[in-house]
Amino acid sequence: MPICEICGLEVVTVYECSKCEAKFCEECGDIKLKLCYDCLNWEEEDEEESGGGEGWEDEEDWEDDDFN
């Protein structure tokens, strides 16, 4: 039986991640997107970082209030 490279368990079927080529089971990734959870998490973090800088605006407002 094949082994999932993410969880290390023997499974009936493994799928290959389209980004890192890791072999993952249906519990350790998105089969439709063909992405393991490691790569899914990286994509989510990239989206959060490019979210428009809302956190920075709040921090700048806080800093301005602190100096007045």
Image (tube, rainbow, N blue to C red):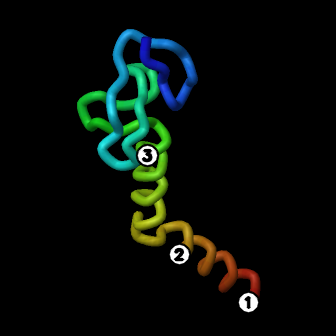
Residue drawn at the location 43% of the way across and 17% of the way down? 2
Q: Residue at x 54, y 16 (%)?
A: 9
Nearer to us of marks 1 and 2 is 2
Kindly give the residue lying farthest to the front in the view shown.
Answer: 1
Q: CA distance from mark 3 to mark 1?
A: 44 Å
Local crowd size for mark 1, using a 10 Å CA cut-off: few (<14), some (14–19), many (≥20) = few
Q: Secondary structure at mark 2?
A: helix
Total residue callouts: 3
Q: Position of residue 68 (x, y in %)?
A: 73, 89
Residue under the image location 42 percent in, 38 percent down: 22
| Inter-mark Cα distance, 1 to 2 | 17 Å
Question: Amino acid under label 1?
Answer: Asn
Query: Closer to the observer: label 3 or label 1?
Result: 3
- The amino acid type, in three-letter code, at marker 2 is Glu
Q: Earlier in the sequence, mark 3 or mark 1?
A: 3
Residue at the image position 40 percent from the left and 70 percent from the top: 52
Q: Position of residue 51 (x, y in %)?
A: 41, 64
Asked whether disc 1 touches disc 2, contact meaning CB atoms under 8 Å apart, the reply is no
List the residue tagged with mark 2. 57
Q: Is residue 21 above or below residue 28?
A: below
* Residue 43 numbered tag: none
- Dividing the picture into quarters, in which one does residue 1 lie? top left
Q: Which mark is residue 39?
A: 3
Mark 1, residue position: 68
Amino acid found under the numbered disc labelled 3 = Cys
Q: Earlier in the sequence, mark 1 or mark 2?
A: 2
Q: Residues within 10 Å of mark 3 (few under 14, many from 20)?
A: some
Q: Nearer the viewer, residue 10 or 40?
A: 10
2 or 3: tag closer to the N-terminus: 3
* Element on which disc 1 rests: loop
Mark toward the viewer: 2 or 3 = 3
